Image (spheres, grey):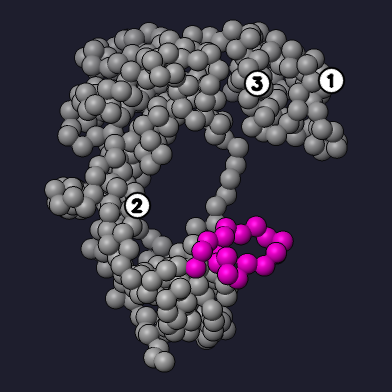
Amino acid sequence: MVEIEEIGGELRMERIGAHSHIKGLGLDESGRAKQVADGLVGQTRAREAAGLVVMMAKEGKLSGKAVLLAGPPGTGKTAIAVAMARELGEDVPFIQLSGSEIYSTERKKTEVLMEAMRKAIGVKVRELRKVYEGEVKELDIKMGSSPYNPFVKVPQEAVITLKTTDEEKRIRVGPNVARQLVEFGIAEGDVIMIDAKDGRVSKVGRSTESFSYDLEAEQLVPRPDGQVLKEKEFVYVLTLDDLDRMVARRRSGGGLFSLLFGVEEKEIDPEVRAAVDQQVKEWVEMGRAEIVPGVMFIDDAHLMDIEALSFISRAMESELVPIIVMATNRGITKIRGTEIEAPFGMPLDLLDRLVIITTDKYSKEEIGHILKIRAKEEGVKLSDDALELLMELGTKKSLRYAVQILGIAGVRIRSRGKEEIGREDVEEVARRFSDVREAVDHLRRYEEELLK
């Protein structure tokens, strides 16, 4: 129980990702793909197939299967995987890794894959908790010397007056809650909640009763009703991996070293995972939780070796498994770790159990639509001549190259105080940056002079 005594009388960074604009598969009510919708362009056949896979997953008929997206580079395989997760729901976990990420000198391949799978399985927990909720009317934070460094001042305790429409209450909180109050910048007029058990502080917003026209934007909320100390139902989603690590830390007991430096075990004990699975099963049976299977996307799946592919094949038969989506741009190639050649570099018995969706190269017009979407996402304007040249580059070289040139040209015009990318900006950037074929030709031209 956290130290909270009644007295009587997460920084988020945002960045532009390659697929941050995708909202779904862009299908109509009958499951037909629109040409341009939800951030996706073209690939209508593949998107409609992905929509059917999503329907299978929602009906629980994807058990024992996985999905393979196969097609040339830059044909939207990752975008379709992201869109599938978006279609499944807002709280659905989406984990992406490359087939090469499983190779580590510190951890086993199967451990990396197991961790990724458990990160892709959510647990929606419903819990009744006692909280102190109200508008902060008075706040007094007392500072003192840190126990680890006497020259550093840290919050020691705080006295807070919380007010609702029905009552006003003063509480004294310990250093853990006081530290959070400082970190979140809690001030008089804010509406907050403090968990009575673990002391977790949440800032709900700024009370409409105390609103002033400050320069900073604030989320306005009404002053809470009822008592200051009340029971509220919370619904939140954790992953199985989150629960694994919580239980592992609790069992290890920690110590001063781990407290100071955040050291934790590289691998989770199988007994811990078994205990978590049993606990989650009990929660589900009691109606306190429900399982939210997510999407585990493995790009460049051909880079996995026979051991990892065998693990995937075995995991597909498990009762508790996410939707496994793999992607590859290889044709007939060797299965890594063997001398056997097979389609996509995968064993035939695994391929036989995959739902395979193929993607095609984009047309020039589709490339133009994609470039317009990327330009809008990156906050830059394109002249018609610049767009036409980028479309030509995307057709002759690759869509990825055209998108890269677009991003670099955007940086160039901002540095020069311009608002629109012109044809000359694209030409200038394209002269300085090579695509893969040009880079290979360059290496061949100077092969004898390069270091061996």
Q: Residues within 10 Å of mark 3 (few under 14, many from 20)?
A: many
Asked where in the image residue 172 lies, by quadrant, the reply is bottom left
Residue annotated with mark 1: 424
279 sits left or right of 137 in the view? left
Name the residue nearer the viewer: 60 or 347: 60
Please tell me which residue is depicted at 42% across the width and 32% down the height of the picture: 86
In the figure, 12 relative to 394: above or below? below
Q: Amino acid at mark 1?
A: Glu
Residue annotated with mark 3: 371
Q: Position of residue 229 (x, y in %)?
A: 35, 75
Q: CA distance from mark 2 to mark 1?
A: 51 Å
412 sits left or right of 332 in the view? right
Choose the circle earlier in sequence order: 2 or 3: 2
Magenta-colored span: 205-223
Dot 3: what SS? helix
Please tell me which residue is depicted at 63% across the width and 8% down the height of the picture: 364
Q: Position of residue 69 (x, y in %)?
A: 39, 17
Q: Which mark is residue 236?
A: 2
Q: Position of residue 27 (x, y in %)?
A: 44, 19
Whether residue 218 appears in magenta in the rendering, the answer is: yes
Front of the two marks 2 and 3: 2
Name the outermost residue toward the bottom.
Answer: 9
Name the outermost residue toward the front.
Answer: 166
Q: CA distance from mark 2 to mark 3?
A: 37 Å
Q: Amino acid at mark 2?
A: Tyr
Please tell me which residue is depicted at 70% across the width and 34% down the height of the picture: 379
In the figure, 153 relative to 430: above or below? below
Dot 2: what SS? strand
